[in-house]
Image (cartoon, grey):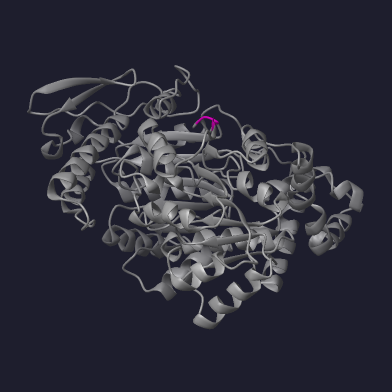
Amino acid sequence: MKTLNDAKDILKKYYGYESFRPGQGELIEAVISGRDALGIMPTGAGKSLCFQIPALLADGITIVISPLISLMKDQVASLNAAGVHAAYLNSSLTARQYEKALEIAKTGRYKLIYVAPERLDTPRFLDFALDPRVNISFLAVDEAHCVSQWGQDFRPSYLKIMDFVKKLPKRPVLGAYTATATRQVRDDIRKILELDDPKCITTGFDRDNLYFAVEKPKDKYAALRFYIREKEDAMPGLSGIVYCGTRKNVEMVTERLTQDGFSAAAYHAGMSEEDRSRNQEAFINGEVQIMVATNAFGMGIDKPDVRFVVHYNMPKDMESYYQEAGRAGRDGEMAECMLFYSGRDVKMNEYFINLDNENEDMTEEEKEVIRERDRERLKKMTFYCFSKTCLRDYILRYFGEVGKAKCDNCSVCLGRGTGEAPKYASKERVRRERNITFNIPEGLGDAEYNSERAAVYSAQASVGMSRRQRKQSMLDSMSGSDREIFDALREVRTKLAKEHHTHPYIIFADKTLVLMSKARPHTKAEMLEISGVGEYKYEKYGEEFLNALNSFR
């Protein structure tokens, strides 16, 4: 039987890391011992390794159920770059490519196969899964919150997963993984996926490298422009995401940013697949610095060096907000999450809630239950924007955890505040839930925010915020000579990414390049000591980086 020491050997060989992050070891050990697992881990905590490493240790094939094409492509590309044979099966493949992938999969060449849940009950995939040569020993469900109607991204196709499992000649070990899940969603995951005495690990939702702030600017675009200009002046070339609530806002913000000299691209569901893919690739490859998008963008995008996420409009709930904001700082380095609030955001979200009748399998009564749940979530999202106490603590308590009373890394704790609470004509009621008191107005959607009494986002306020005393990132703390080396290594990475037709961060993350710049290794042995440099990646790319490093000696 494989042990955790075997898993650590895989971690170093393929991923270049010496030790597991919190929760990873326990989840991996459970799966390799034959036990089901449920992992709730925040974005950037290394969730994918919890099913990838058991897959590499398993005798059979691991099926990874994943909801988005971009997510599959990204993870498979990363695995292939690390020397692992993996494949994906989705609608982006031609019929011939799909058939060829299945034939190769039957030979056991692929250790991991990523598949969309909609494919599980198709004749061709079932023919593969039930082939006597195929041994599916582990089934991992990524983005497992999609199985719950109480989750923010419910997908009916996830309900078909257990139908597929029951058709297999032998039940595989099951693992379920997600970044955001309330207690009710977690219970749903266990029940619907029929997890058998699973090892349940919740590593905590806190990501202390993220700075949270809420502003209520009179002119949102002016505030955004100033904010991004400040970031660009401080560190040229930084990547960021601006989320907008509507396609119209995406187009407007992208056009104005471009006119003002910023490198920006748009992404929303109204664009053609070709345009979306082109803009996404440009952003991931660093050819475009700012992605302006609706919530259609980001799920499954593992770009680790996003330094800021700005919500130009308030999202509909805390789950969506934390998932989208969490796309900043995946490399563990300091990053910022800014939310621009206005009363119109509430009305816009209420409109979308009332309009949402997608699921034709639900009765009208069931739809109304879901709408009422979404209205409650919207209220809690709104009151986050007016919290007079620590924003991080508010987020953690929403997800059932207890944070610190003062985190010293949000706008409230550092004296910026979130502005005055809104005034409503209707009578307020008080609801206490998870030890948070929410003053919930009955007619929230019709309420108008008193902008005259709001905090005005001005240039002076923004400068004051940027000069706050808080933790520096590794990039911020680099010396001039280290920065010169870092820039040279990034050029090497860009060149290699183009040659190998892959994303720059799949070769090495910024964090790894920073460590190289500071340690300045000049031998293979020294290079392999750098976190993020595994044996396979060194053999494939290492010499190019050593040559660049040695040129500075």
- Horizontal placement of 528 versus 99: left or right? right
> Quadrant location of the N terminus?
top right
Tell me where residue 295 sits by quadrant: bottom left
Q: Main secondary structure of the magenta part?
A: strand
Res 73 visible: yes
Q: Report the front residue among 407 and 450.
A: 407
For the point 78% across and 58% down, the residue is: 537
Vertical side of 334 occupied by 300: above or below: below
Q: Residue furthest bottom?
A: 96
Q: How many marks?
A: 0
Q: Residue 193: image x %, image y %?
A: 44, 44
- Horizontal placement of 318 versus 238: left or right? left
Q: Which residues are magenta?
A: 200-204
Q: Report the front residue among 1 and 384.
A: 1
Vertical side of 165 occupied by 288: above or below: below
For the point 59% across and 62% down, the residue is: 113
- Horizontal placement of 6 versus 179: left or right? right
Vertical side of 417 occupied by 77: above or below: below
Verify whether residue 187 appears in magenta: no
Res 40 visible: no
Q: Residue 361: image x %, image y %?
A: 22, 56
Q: Residue 137: image x %, image y %?
A: 62, 53
For the point 54% across and 44% down, the residue is: 175
Q: Report the front residue among 122 and 299.
A: 122
Q: Residue 170: image x %, image y %?
A: 57, 53
